[in-house]
Amino acid sequence: MASHQEVVRGLNVEKYMGRWYEIASFPSFFQPKGGVDTRATYTLRPDGNISVLNEVWVNGRRKSISGTAYKADPRSDEAKLKVRFRIPPDLPFVPVVGDYWVLYVDDGYQNAVVGHPTRRFLWRVVHTCMHGINVKTGAA
């Protein structure tokens, strides 16, 4: 059994929105092998949930999946989210739900670490693309 993990408390969801680029991760069975330029784009919806678009390029072709994220416990201030995807994307009646825990985010919301309660999955993500342009502001 995994020991307790600290997660971010009081996550500013509005600041967290936008495109995040994966710069490191634990290998996972659900991400394509040989993928490059992996990124996730989060958009706040009017209902308070978050639209999720995950993208990766494999052999020069874009692969993507869309989903919805929401607080695991709406009464908690912990950044423990659930993410629901439809697998395969063309069949809306087959949802798959996973945990998405924000373990760290810096004060400027430019760097984050995202994990899973089992500790099998971990991602290091940044809001700045590899070419040095800040995705949220357009500044170099």
Image (spheres, rainbow, N blue to C red):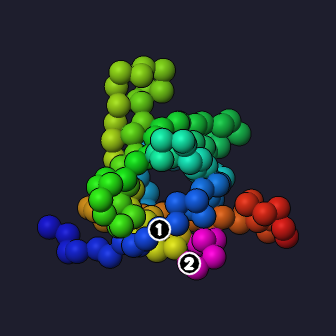
Q: Which mark is residue 11?
A: 1
Query: Of residues 21 and 29, which is closer to you in this image?
Result: 21
Q: Residue 99: percent from the left, percent from the top? A: 34, 53
* Residue 109 magenta-highlighted: yes
- For image coordinates 63% across by 76% down, the residue present is 108
Look at the numbered discs 1 and 2 and tell me whether their residues touch, using CB distance below 8 Å: no
Which stretch is magenta?
Answer: 106-111
Q: Residue 53: percent from the left, percent from the top? A: 57, 42
**Quarter residue 97 falls in:** top left
Q: Quadrant of the C terminus?
A: bottom right
Dominant secondary structure (helix, strand or loop) of the stretch shown in magenta? loop
Q: Quadrant of the N terminus?
A: bottom left
**Quarter residue 75 falls in:** bottom left
* Residue 71 magenta-highlighted: no
Q: Is residue 111 visible?
A: yes
Query: Of residues 112 and 45, which is closer to you in this image?
Result: 45
- For image coordinates 60% across by 64% down, the residue present is 15
